[in-house]
Image (cartoon, grey):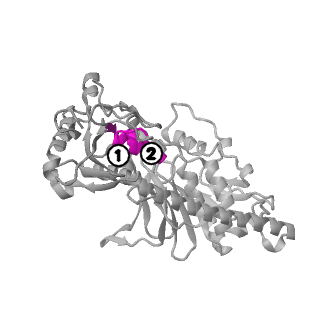
Amino acid sequence: MAAHLSGPNGLVPVHIAVHDPSEMEEPDPQAADYARQRFAASARYAGIRWSEHGVEPRWLDQDTSTCAAAINPSHFSGRGADEFDRFLSGAASRREPALIIATMGNVDDDNNGVRSVFGRPGGRVDFRHFTGSIAGKRLLAGAEVSLAPDLDAADRDLGLRLRNRPANAPWWAMAVQPTAMEGPRGTTVHTPEGELVPILVDSLGEPVVARWTSGDGQQIWYVIPDGVDWNTVVDWLVQRALPEHVPAALRRVRSRHSVDPDLETPAEKQARGALEEMERRYREEKTRLQADLEQARQEAEPVRSGLLYGSGAELVDAVAVVLRAAGFTVTDLDAELGTQSADLLAELDGSACLVEVKAASGAAGEKLVSYLQRHLETWPQLRPGQPVTCAALIVNHQHRLYPAERPAEVYQRKGFVDAIPFPVLATTTLFAWWCAQDWPAVRAAVLGRSQSGEPGSPSTGGSEPQGRRRRRWFLSGGDGTT
């Protein structure tokens, strides 16, 4: 093994278990699989700007005893096992944890069915000198991932960097599994050692990026998915992981990323303290704003979902919330009278309005109007001492479509629209007014008045409710008089 000597040049030595890609020549297409895969394994690291990130790479056949970290070390003899052991021994002699980054899965293996013979298995990460391993199962395309809770600064930063990968980047769900050893007396299963801490998790809570730490703290493994931007990972390694886990490695090489408070000038301490205070305030403010956003979403989602996609009780409840917000006193008639009457009674300033709420996955049927007409006819028998002064039909039509793709009006046939004796209001319009908190528009639309109190249309946003300019025959005595 060739000796590799260096002084404190500001670059942190890091072991990578492949040959130097700058010294590799692409093999002929007819070359053996081993030669092509050997070249491909090195080519993965060809675009890394090592010195820009403050790193000196140590490849196969180079000394690794002084390395501060290792990237995808190998257990296989002749392919990096010796370099891996020297790296571990060097860290142990300095009483430092061995910091290791390993990729889970292999994009090429899963895409074309060719299993690499150069390096470790694609869907498993094996530990060195500890029992157990981490098995990975590739997730389907489009899997959603999120940060695990209660992460320290270094782990959170890694999670944020990897979470922003391209949408088509692959993920593997990880799980720790025991080690099975075959012997003359059969198979012996050894319980996995160490602790696996999730950093990014999928929708089922399974880790897709994680940190494994041995029980004695001698080894720290960061397991990340294959197909990462290695410049991002190497930058994180020097800026976050090494200062957190192996800060002495930065001091030894006089890295520009090494911060020793005891050697700082007062100006440096003041500037660093101000920066840390700013970051602390930022984190606190961000946490507060995120909590405000989550609370606002929790309050808005039932109404948004109900108005735009709901039917039945969910839709009626959402409409009732909007009407109450607009100042109406709302009675749930279904709860009091069952299906004999309309869904809601909305009262405001002496006006009492029967509100029928309907949903249609496609175009709204014209018969929906007759339902409200029938309820108006039977209302005097149900509540003889409580006359109604107006009525409104509210319809969530075409609710299988995205709201912007739906027709603005519930009904399009002009002759039918002209004959409707009460307002017909689309829930998309009601939703727009609710979002804008335009309560005068809601009141005017439901009561069939202009905002000045006269018959007419609301003065702001949304579509004009259909049919409300017609004479309200249901308020007459049957002969056309009011």
Instruction: Say which element carries label 1.
Output: helix
Which stretch is magenta? 424-450
With 16 as the anchor, is 331 left or right in this view?
Answer: left
In the rendered structure, find residue 168 and report the number of the disc placed on it: none
Callout 2: SS: helix
Q: Nearer the viewer, residue 343 or 8?
A: 343
User: Does residue 166 appear left or right of residue 445 in this picture?
Assistant: right
In which image quadrant can residue 111 be found? top left
Q: State the residue position of label 2.
A: 440
Q: Residues within 10 Å of mark 1 (few under 14, many from 20)?
A: many
Q: Position of residue 344 (x, y in %)?
A: 26, 51
State the residue at coordinates (70%, 64%).
Answer: 66
- Given contact means CB atoms under 8 Å apart, are the residues at marks 2 and 1 in contact? no
- The front one of 151 and 458 is 458
In the rendered structure, the answer to whether residue 56 lies left or right of residue 120 reads: right
Task: Give how far across and how far down residue 327 sits, in percent.
Answer: 40, 53
Measured as percent of width and height from the top left, residue 90 is found at 66, 69
Please tell me which residue is depicted at 29% across the width and 29% down the height of the picture.
Answer: 411
Residue for badge 1: 307
Dominant secondary structure, magenta: helix
**Is there any visible trace of residue 115 in the rendered image?**
no
Locate the N terminus by quadrant.
Answer: bottom right
Q: Amino acid at mark 2?
A: Pro
